[in-house]
Amino acid sequence: MKGWVLCALLAASPVWAQAPAAPAPASATLPEAMPADVRARVEPERVLLGEPFVYELAITHPAQQRYELELPADLGDFEVISQERTPPESGKEPAVTTFRLRMSAFKLGTVTLPEVPFAVSTPEGPHRYVAPGRTLEVGSTLPDDAQTKGEDLRDIQPPTEVAIRSLTLVWVLLGAIAAALLGVVAWRAFQKYRERKLAAVAPPLPLDVRTRRALDALKTEDLPARGQVKDFYFRLSEILRGYLGERYGFDALECTSSELMTRLRGLHAPGLPEDGLMRFISESDMVKYARADASADSCQDALTFGYALLDKTWPPLLPPVAADVSHASGPRVS
């Protein structure tokens, strides 16, 4: 039995010797490129855990060569956030290609950056180059005395139920306050609307009543005793002009003194004291516009004239009523 096994092994040995070997990785078979110079720097040289930093590689090489970055998928305790390649200037010999890797580290202490492989295109064919890693100091985000104060890093904990404060009650209270404010505003608007409606419906007071009330209010204020003679004449002139304009149907407030007298003389105004009105207008204009002084007695006389003007021109005369012809005395004409 042993003899048969030995014969079988001897017969199969030439076949095994002729079997092709497993192919080696393509990157391992490429020849190494030797750049003229490689300058690497890390900025900043000390970072905090998870804090981004920049790893820059400036490779000086012949202008006929082209360097391309080939980062592995797994970088261990490092993560590449972004990468940037700055090509060499055209026509410059030797050429300088700069690579900037924005990375972050997740291991404390002095760590070594991973080797950075490059694919190099040359006139002789593809080559490869591996830049050695640089050291980097990675510090903790906690203060130096964190461990003594019980603030050291803790391991990941399982999911925990967290109570979240609800703002429902706050929103309900704010909604109630807003509704109350809107109710107050609506009530006030309704009251103003009602007042305006009642004022529009209520008939205005007669002209003589309104004018007499205005004269009484001016008398009660007693402006001359307080040294406000000019204001007194302005108010009294406005009251009398407003009365005359409404009484005889024209805009007396916009008339000058001469225009006012001309309009009144052209109207049928029985009882109108023209001489007294003319004296009042002249005296009023002197006080209002010429800064003339007026005594308390003069102011009292002017107010008395206002009442007299109202009494002499009100009530308006009614048109005469034609007599009934059928009851007239005398012979009837047939």
Image: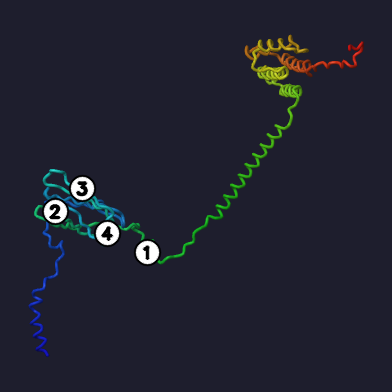
Camera-side residue: 270 or 291?
270
Disc 2: which residue: 121
SS state under label 3? strand
Q: Is residue 292 left or right of residue 138?
A: right
Query: What residue type is disc 4 on?
Result: Phe
Residue at (58, 50) in percent of width and height: 175
Query: Mark 2 and mark 4: span between their CA atoms?
Result: 28 Å
Residue at (92, 12) in percent of width and height: 329
Are dots 1 and 4 in contact, CB under 8 Å?
no
Query: What residue type is disc 2 on?
Result: Ser
Of the numbered discs 3 and 1, the one sitting upstream in the chain is 3
Which mark is nearer the camera, 2 or 1?
2
Disc 1: which residue: 154
SS state under label 1? loop
SS state under label 4? strand
Camera-side residue: 51 or 87?
87
